[in-house]
């Protein structure tokens, strides 16, 4: 019995991986993914950073937080409604695996996109602008953990029962933008008014930004271990209700 | 053991009752047809049977595996071919099959051998490295069926497999269904095409307003409504609208125009024959052809669902044009 459970667990992990690999191949060049996942973080960065006289290292840490946040949290809201519309989502739901496995696979896709996209600013910053990374290990952990947490956040949005990308992107934008503005991205936590700081701690982006500051600049506001603990917890916190919300969508026929 | 056992299956969408305490069984190795007009609850029932939709209440068991306890083992027995061919158009035929095989944990050696066998038997081997986006509707359909078979399921669900396909593709798919059934697979066929069900199915269920209205073999259902027989007649003049006069003939229940012919539905064909000959004489018409017809499965369907002959033909035409209009 125990062997069977272990076999099933191994099978389900492999199925999540198979879904992730397929999604990467099928969706990496779709227009909504390019728009919301690739271009948007760069537009945002330039909108809020040009002529503000910030150092290249500060800019790099900020851009890494923006890319992992927007790219990872866009994958689910782009891919799942597209798959619902084409009927390919039914193919996954009918396969012998749990809904958690399916969502785990989808979260890996978002994380993979975010990791790939974050390589772009990282390469530019290090190679062309001469930014030196203070702690490479923290940087790798930061990119991985932030990407996973924000990808799971995207899946929460994707549980909205809809078959068009727009129907999910609109409410997701309504939530993501306030999370961006209350985080410590544009106003560092150390410069933030004391009354505003508790709001910043409500945004998952705050912890990612703080970890990237630790990794690139060598200084952060929070202890680095706290960021490292909070981000995986956020991943689990977002993934668990996803199963409930996606199950609700199935009851409604989506 | 039955392939499918359904008891009291019910589905509400909010206040709307889509499926109302449906119960039936599908025997192992049979082709089971599931018929019904639009909105009758066919697709909702099929989606619940394939675990895509959760029932409001009721019990489903596939090969003895109860969905309420654990649908996982049942899913291994099921292959699903939905109405829209849900292949990944960005992937090649081979990649589509490999992805599905990996998803069902088919071992590497077996998945490659099975993929080759399926692609060859479905006439897609030469196109295995071509992306599915350039496939015709018939090819996508065949690929979709191949993907449903890659893990060798013992129960195959086919939802409207042929609408919008040309005659050759339709015949090829009918042949495939017969072959898959001959190999021992149970087939659950949801269809609008009543003739298709009549040709392929061992038994059919007719669902109407969310309830099963009849379940039996096509021939038994036809025998049950022998009162709905018909006479088909063609006159030398086709441009005249004879419907009102024909409908007024003795013992005629309904009249339908079928191309250049008229079909007169009756419970007493001999009385209608006599009055029909009188009618042709008095209206100076020559009978070009005349035949009496036993009830078809379509007549059974219409009798049970209580709809006019014309309305179902219009609906089928609309469905066909909608599907062909929306796809390659």
Image (cartoon, rainbow, N blue to C red):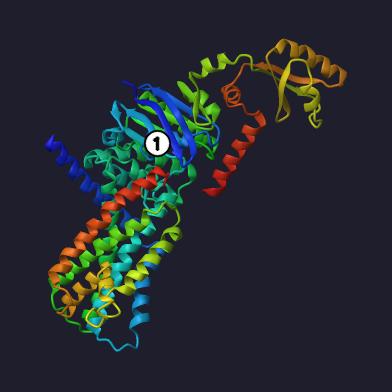
> Residue shown at 50%/36% (left/top)?
B162
Q: Quadrant of the N terminus of chain B?
A: top left
Q: Position of residue A243 (x, y in %)?
A: 30, 49
Asked if residue A83 is positioned above or below residue A212 in the image, the reply reads above
Q: Is residue A69 visible?
A: yes
> Residue shown at 70%/12% (left/top)?
B268
Residue at which label 1 appears: B56
Residue found farthest to the top: B270
Q: Is residue A121 visible?
A: no
Q: Quadrant of residue A193?
A: bottom left
Q: Position of residue A210 (x, y in %)?
A: 21, 74
Q: Quadrant of residue A66?
A: bottom left
> Residue shown at 54%/40% (left/top)?
B164
Q: Position of residue B15 (x, y in %)?
A: 48, 40
Towards the viewer: B124 or A132: A132
Task: Tally the numbered discs.
Answer: 1
Q: Position of residue B211 (x, y in %)?
A: 49, 28
Asked if residue A225 is positioned above or below residue B281 in the image, the reply reads below
User: Which chain contains the residue that carries disc 1?
Assistant: B
Q: Is residue B165 left or right of residue B32?
A: right
Towards the viewer: B316 or B53: B53
Towards the viewer: B268 or B145: B268
Asked if residue B123 is positioned above or below residue A201 in the image, the reply reads above
Q: Quadrant of residue B54?
A: top left
Q: Is residue A110 left or right of residue B215?
A: left
Q: Residues within 10 Å of mark 1 (few under 14, many from 20)?
A: some
Q: Secondary structure at mark 1?
A: loop
């Amino acid at each position: 019995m125990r062997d069977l459970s272990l076999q099933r667990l191994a099978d389900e992990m492999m199925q999540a991986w198979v879904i992730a690999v397929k999604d990467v191949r099928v969706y990496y060049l779709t227009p909504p993914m390019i728009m919301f996942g690739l271009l948007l973080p760069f537009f945002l960065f330039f909108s809020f950073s040009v002529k503000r006289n910030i150092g290249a290292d500060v800019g790099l840490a900020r851009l890494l937080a923006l890319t992992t946040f927007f790219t990872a949290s866009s994958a689910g809201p782009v891919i799942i409604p597209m798959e619902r519309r084409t009927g390919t989502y039914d193919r996954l739901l009918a396969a012998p695996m749990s809904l958690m496995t399916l969502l785990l696979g989808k979260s890996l896709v978002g994380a993979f996109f975010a990791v790939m996209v974050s390589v772009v600013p990282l390469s530019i910053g290090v190679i062309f602008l001469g930014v030196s990374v203070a702690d490479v290990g923290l940087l790798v952990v930061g990119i991985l953990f932030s990407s996973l947490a924000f990808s799971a956040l995207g899946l929460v949005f994707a549980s909205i029962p809809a078959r068009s990308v727009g129907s999910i992107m609109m409410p997701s934008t309504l939530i993501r933008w306030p999370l961006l503005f209350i985080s410590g991205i544009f106003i560092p936590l150390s410069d933030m008014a004391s009354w505003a700081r508790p709001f910043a701690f409500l945004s998952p982006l705050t912890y990612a930004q703080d970890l990237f500051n630790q990794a690139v600049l060598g200084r952060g506001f929070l202890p680095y271990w706290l960021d490292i603990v909070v981000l995986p917890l956020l991943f689990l916190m977002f993934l668990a209700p996803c199963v409930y919300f996606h199950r609700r969508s199935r009851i409604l026929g989506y | 053991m039955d392939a499918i056992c359904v008891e009291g299956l019910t589905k509400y969408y909010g206040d709307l009752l889509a499926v109302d305490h449906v119960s039936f069984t599908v025997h192992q190795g049979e082709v089971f047809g599931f018929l019904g007009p639009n909105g009758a609850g066919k697709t909702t029932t099929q989606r619940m049977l394939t675990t895509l939709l959760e029932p409001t209440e009721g019990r489903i068991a596939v090969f003895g595996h109860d969905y309420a306890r654990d649908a996982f083992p049942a899913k291994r027995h099921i292959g699903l071919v939905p109405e829209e061919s849900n292949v990944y158009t960005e992937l090649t035929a081979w990649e589509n099959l490999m992805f599905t095989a990996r998803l069902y944990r088919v071992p590497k050696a077996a998945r490659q051998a099975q993929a080759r066998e399926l692609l060859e038997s479905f006439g897609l081997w030469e196109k295995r490295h071509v992306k599915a986006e350039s496939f015709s509707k018939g090819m996508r359909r065949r690929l979709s069926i191949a993907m449903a078979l890659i893990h060798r399921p013992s129960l195959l669900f086919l939802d409207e497999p042929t609408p919008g396909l040309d005659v050759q593709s339709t015949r090829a798919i009918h042949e495939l269904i017969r072959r898959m059934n001959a190999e021992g697979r149970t087939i659950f066929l949801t269809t609008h095409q009543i003739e298709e069900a009549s040709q392929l199915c061992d038994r059919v269920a007719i669902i109407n307003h969310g309830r099963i209205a009849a379940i039996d073999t096509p021939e038994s259902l036809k025998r049950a409504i022998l009162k709905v027989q018909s006479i088909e007649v063609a006159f030398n003049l086709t441009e005249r609208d004879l419907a009102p006069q024909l409908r007024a003939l003795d013992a005629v229940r309904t009249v339908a125009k079928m191309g250049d012919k008229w079909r007169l539905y009756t419970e007493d064909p001999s009385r209608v024959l006599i009055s029909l000959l009188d009618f042709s004489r008095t209206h100076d018409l020559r009978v070009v052809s005349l035949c009496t017809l036993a009830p078809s499965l379509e007549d059974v369907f219409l009798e049970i669902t209580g709809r006019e002959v014309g309305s179902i033909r219009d609906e089928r035409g609309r469905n066909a044009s909608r599907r062909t209009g929306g796809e390659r």
